[in-house]
Image: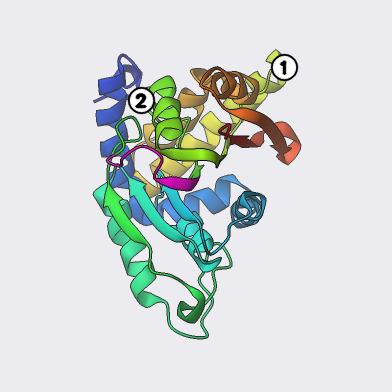
Amino acid sequence: MSLRRAFDTPETKRRYNRQLFATIADRYDLITAVLSYGQDARWKRRLVAEAAITPHDRALDLACGTGDIAFAVAARGARTVGLDLTFRMLALAGQKQAALVPGEQHPGAGIASRQQLRPVRFIQGDMTWLPFVASSFDVVTTGYGLRNVPDLRAAIAEIGRVLKPGGRFLSLDFNRPQSAIIRSAYLSYLGVVGSVLGFILHRDPDTYRYIAASLQRYPGAAGVAGLLAAGGFTNVRVVPLLGGLMSLHLAELPR
């Protein structure tokens, strides 16, 4: 399926994402580091710190990729589940978990050793239809998940459904700048860099052009905050990162 057709319907976006992320999975950690100027690990640590994880928490990391946020949450003692649409991502996350040994630091997000790390349970699934009963989790996190989900409102509704009253939701993602000038420059930059990386790594310029294309259809940090509030979340906050080109969302369900 071509990138031009990927956004025609939620189902075409779901199919495109499944194929895309299977293709890029083995280079996913490299790409996130490159496109974040090496800041990705620091931003994920910020997300986990803001989540105020306790050993009594049950946590769900959506679009978990190769597992960095899930491992960081588990390192703070939470019983953690990581969910992703792409089997290859989950396989790589499982390899990372198996490679952890006592005294060794996990690459990618400053993860603690196996002695401090509760095992993460990884499952394949869709953010718009979560295979969990209502009020299952104290914390839900996602890194680069909301922008990629086929139906953003449905995903927010599902996150609210599986969170317990008083539960916390945190999301890290690219932002869509409100300024037309900044937005145009930013999307052009991502398009050019994505084309070069896609050709070098996959011989397909469209592979990482997807990021800019997805941002063109993304409501941006303020829009997502509005959707969270409309979905029943309270205390919704947006923390700008990288001068507002990235953002961290924090929200809670009322008790």
Where does label 1 land, which residue?
179
**Quadrant the C terminus occupies:** top right
At which x and y percent is residue 223?
Answer: 60, 18
Which amino acid type is shown beneath numbered disc 2?
Pro
Q: Residues within 10 Å of mark 1 (few under 14, many from 20)?
A: few
Residue projecting furthest to the bottom: 103
Q: Quadrant of residue 206?
A: top left
Nearer to us of marks 2 and 1 is 2
Judged from the image, the secondary structure of the residue bearing numbered disc 1 is: loop
Q: Is residue 106 left or right of residue 203?
A: right
Magenta stretch bounds? 131-139
**Residue 187 seen by the camera:** yes
**Quadrant the N terminus occupies:** top left
- Sequence-wise, the earlier of marks 2 and 1 is 2
**Residue 144 seen by the camera:** no
* Viewer-proximal residue among 6 and 233: 233
Which amino acid type is shown beneath numbered disc 1?
Ser
Q: Residues within 10 Å of mark 2 (few under 14, many from 20)?
A: many
Residue projecting furthest to the front: 255
Where does label 2 land, which residue?
150
